[in-house]
Structure formats: C-alpha cells, structure tokens
Image: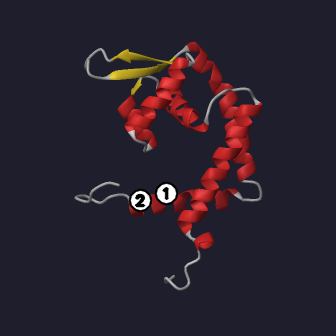
C-alpha cells in the first residue's frame, strides 16, 4: 500500500479500533441491561483482580497497558462502590495492593456471562480457525510494534 492507495476505512488500525469500540459498546450495554453498574474500563481492572487478587496499581497499569493515573481513578471508583479496597503492602510500605471485596467477587459471574455473550455475538459467522487466525494476527501485529531494546516506549 502506498500513500495514493491508502484508504482509512481499510487500514489495519482503523479496523482494529472499530472492532474494539464495537466490543466495548456492546459489553457496556449488556452490563447496563444486567444492572451490574460497571463501566468496561472498570471491568478490565476487575478481570485482572479476579485472575490474581492483590495486585499493585502499577501491576494493573502494566497488565492493561494504561497510564497509572487512569488506573488510580478507576480504582477510586471501584473503591467508592465497595468493590475493592486498597491495603498497604506488608513488605514494601510504599506500595498499596488492591483487593476484591466480597461484593467485588460476587460481580464476577454476571460480568463474565455478559462478556461471553458479547464475544459470542462478535464471533457469529466465524469458524474457530478464523477466530484463532484473527487472534494470532493481532498478537503478531502487537509483537511487531512493541518497542525494541533501546527504543523509547510510546
């Protein structure tokens, strides 16, 4: 592809962004319809904690490839809803760990049901082989664009 034949609506970045937004919008609607009261961004944090409770905000930031200040605001919102609590790390007093509350743990089932419905709808008409090829292509794109040793990130 060259500059003359470039078409935004056919570019990889544009298509990946549209698909990502469509997934997030569908999931957000499902959360709202189910009365879960979570944003998709908060759900991403919760998903990491459901997988490994007690992460630091830096670990959450790294896991979601998101700025630490944005994660702090998300955790603030989750804490205000009593879904998580922050606690000082027992070994390093400078660190604070984020733990799920009982209420936060209870949300998992409903959120996962909504997420699976969204993924099922998104994959309608695609074979498992096509889905795996899509996942592998996206992983390869991410690896190709990851900063190489000595290159600055971002």
Taking the view exactly as shown, the residue that stands out farthest to the bottom is: 4
Give coordinates of residue 20: x percent, y percent.
Answer: 60, 52
Give coordinates of residue 80: x percent, y percent.
Answer: 53, 18
Q: Is residue 132 visible?
A: no
| Residue at left offset 55%, top offset 15% | 82
Crowding near pointer 1: few (<14 within 10 Å), some, many (20+)?
A: few
Quick one: 143 or 13, which is closer to the camera?
13
Image marks 1 and 2: residues in contact by CB distance under 8 Å? yes
For the C terminus, the image quarter is: bottom left
Q: Is residue 77 visible?
A: yes
Q: Which residue is mark 2?
A: 143
| Residue at left offset 73%, top offset 39% | 29
Give coordinates of residue 34: x percent, y percent.
Answer: 75, 29
Left or right of 24, for residue 78: left
Q: Which residue is mark 1?
A: 139
Quick one: 116 or 59, which is closer to the camera?
59
């Amino acid at each position: 592809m060259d500059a003359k034949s470039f078409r935004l609506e056919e570019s990889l970045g544009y298509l990946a962004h549209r698909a990502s937004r469509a997934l997030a919008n569908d999931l957000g609607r499902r959360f709202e319809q189910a009365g879960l009261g979570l944003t998709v961004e908060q759900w991403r944090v919760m998903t990491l904690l459901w997988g490994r409770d007690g992460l630091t905000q830096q670990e959450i930031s790294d896991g979601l490839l998101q700025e630490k200040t944005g994660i702090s605001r998300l955790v603030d919102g989750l804490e205000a809803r009593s879904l998580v609590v922050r606690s000082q790390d027992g070994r390093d007093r400078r660190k604070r760990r984020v733990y799920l509350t009982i209420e936060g743990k209870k949300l998992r089932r409903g959120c996962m049901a909504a997420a699976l419905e969204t993924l099922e709808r998104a994959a309608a008409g695609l074979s498992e082989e096509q889905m795996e090829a899509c996942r592998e292509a996206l992983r390869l794109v991410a690896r190709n664009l990851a900063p190489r040793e000595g290159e600055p990130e971002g």
